[in-house]
Each structure stands twice: as structure tokens, then as C-alpha cells.
Image (cartoon, rainbow, N blue to C red):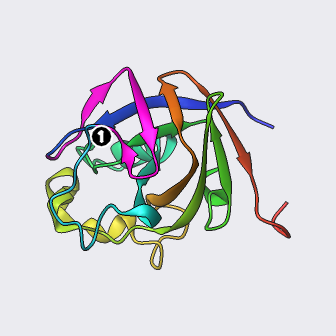
Amino acid sequence: MREAWIFQINAGQGMPKQVVNQAVVTEDGIEGDGQRNRELHGGIERALCLFSLDRLLAFQEEGHPIYPGAMGENLTLTGLDWGQVVPGARLKLGRQVLVEITGYTSPCSTVQDYFKDKVITRTSQKKYPGWSRVYARVLQPGQIRIGDRVALMLPAGRD
């Protein structure tokens, strides 16, 4: 099994999110983070948005001018098999925080400038399975830091 960790923590009131070295994670998400459209983002079932550094780097290789935090993800993680980060999977973040993946995000026009030709569907789970950001609910709040280890626990039947 590969080692995985938190590469970057991103929070703020606008887009792109700003890097923070550590954060307190509550049932509502990262303290100090906000979303403009609470109908589509945030809330208990979408408390955190997570994405893969490995996928971001692959997007850059495709020529997309994207970087960690640009798509509004709260956590940029590395070392995970992103195709295994599916609804029902749980992630232990550092020593305290436990989250459960609740679903995939939809491509959003607010990130179109980070994709060549503004083709945001490159992050569509339906068109490109395993290339979407994911939402998570917080099962156990606590504190996290950049560099904290991440452990993936797959839902029953997916190991």
C-alpha cells in the first residue's frame, strides 16, 4: 500500500482557495472557509471538498493551467489511488479527523479559467471516471496539518 498524505490545505471565502498550514475541521468543514453558493456547495454532506495532487499534475501535463486550490478543494491529497476514493470510503486525516466520501462534485463554471479552452467537463465523473473532486462529511472533527498521513478505508466489497 502506498503512503498518502495531505499535500495542501485550502480555505477562504473566494476562489481560488488560499493555502493554510493547519486547520480545525468541524462538522461544517474547515473553520474560516466559506462558499458563495450554499445550495450547491457546503453543508454537512459536502463539508469538505477533496482532490488528488496526482490528478492535478496530470491535468497540467495535458496543458491545463491548474494548480492546487484552484478548483476550490479544501484538501489536496497525494499518494492515494484516486479511483478508489468513492462514495462510502472513509479517510483518516492525521491523528484525529475521520471523513466519509459522500459523492462526486459537478464541473463548475467558476473554474473554467484553469482549463484550456475552458473545458470544465474534464473533471466530470460521468465522462472521466476517477477524475472528479469528491465531497465528504466529517465523522470525527479535529485538527489537521500539511504533511499529515492519510489512510483510506474502502467500503465493504471494494477491497
Q: Is residue 127 left or right of residue 158?
A: left
Q: Residue at x 32, y 71 (%)?
A: 121
Q: Is residue 80 visible?
A: no
Residue 116: percent from left, percent from top: 20, 56
Q: Is residue 137 above or below residue 91?
A: below
Q: Residue at x 29, y 64 (%)?
A: 41
Front-lying residue, 109 or 72: 72
Q: Is residue 130 above or below residue 96?
A: below
The quarter of the rendered structure image containing the C terminus is bottom right
Q: Is residue 68 above or below residue 121?
A: above
Q: Residue at x 16, y 47 (%)?
A: 15
- Amino acid type assigned to the residue bearing label 1 in the image: Gly
Element assignment for label 1: loop
Q: Is residue 63 above or below residue 148?
A: below
Q: What span is colored magenta in the figure?
A: 14-31
- The answer to which image quadrant residue 56 occupies is top left
Front-lying residue, 46 or 112: 46
